[in-house]
Image (cartoon, helix red, strand yellow):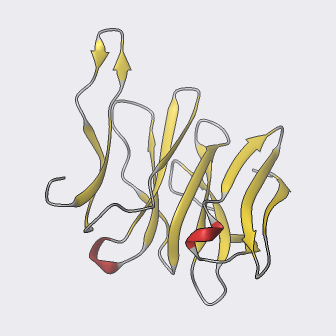
Amino acid sequence: SVDEVRDMAFVTKTDTGWSQSKLVAKDNWNIAGCPVNGPRIAGYGNTVATAWYTSALSRPTVKVAFKADENFDEPIIIDSTSPIGRVDISMLNEQTAIVSWMDGGETPAIKYRIVNQNGSMSSVKTVTRVSESRGSGFPQMEVFDGYVYFGWTELNEHNTTVKMAKLRLSI
């Protein structure tokens, strides 16, 4: 907003044009400047889910919200321990998504969790340790044929390498 409050909103394209903007959630995150952490969105059938990072009230949090009708459900908190954002999301079916993010805790890492639209979640799992510097980029995640593929940039003193991991899904 003009007051530098960052709340997620969405529009829908119909046969008659674009809908009015509707809020996904009202985080009321006041941030001076342009945040690097943008939301991600994924769909499966008639369901859409979006994941985002917020630091409203100086509380770093990763959230997800599902939409199966006109509006998004109440956000589900995925992590509020020490995330630094850089989220990604993929749908596994019409009720379930996998969300990944970067954690800046004692050992910075890419983490993920499977979440259901009803609010049930798997435990938080770690993909790999990673540098939390901006040079490490934005980890990516894709689901294909029963596996989830993670891609990220690994930094060291002499070079930069793109790394990947493959994980069999069991939901």
Of the pair 4 and 77, the residue shown nearer to us: 4
Coordinates of residue 156 in the picture (x, y in percent): 76, 79
Coordinates of residue 53 in the picture (x, y in percent): 44, 63
Q: On the image, which quarter does residue 19 sit in?
A: top left
Side of 14 where 122 appears, left or right: right
Coordinates of residue 23 in the picture (x, y in percent): 27, 44
Of the pair 1 and 22, the residue shown nearer to us: 1
Whether residue 152 is situated above or below residue 97 in the rendered picture = below
Side of 161 where 138 appears, left or right: left
Report if residue 128 is visible in the image: yes
Q: Residue at x 30, y 14 (%)?
A: 17
Whether residue 38 is situated above or below residue 153 in the rendered picture = above
Of the pair 171 and 31, the residue shown nearer to us: 31
Whether residue 66 is situated above or below residue 111 in the rendered picture = above
Q: Residue at x 29, y 9 (%)?
A: 16
Seen from this angle, which residue lies furthest bottom?
106
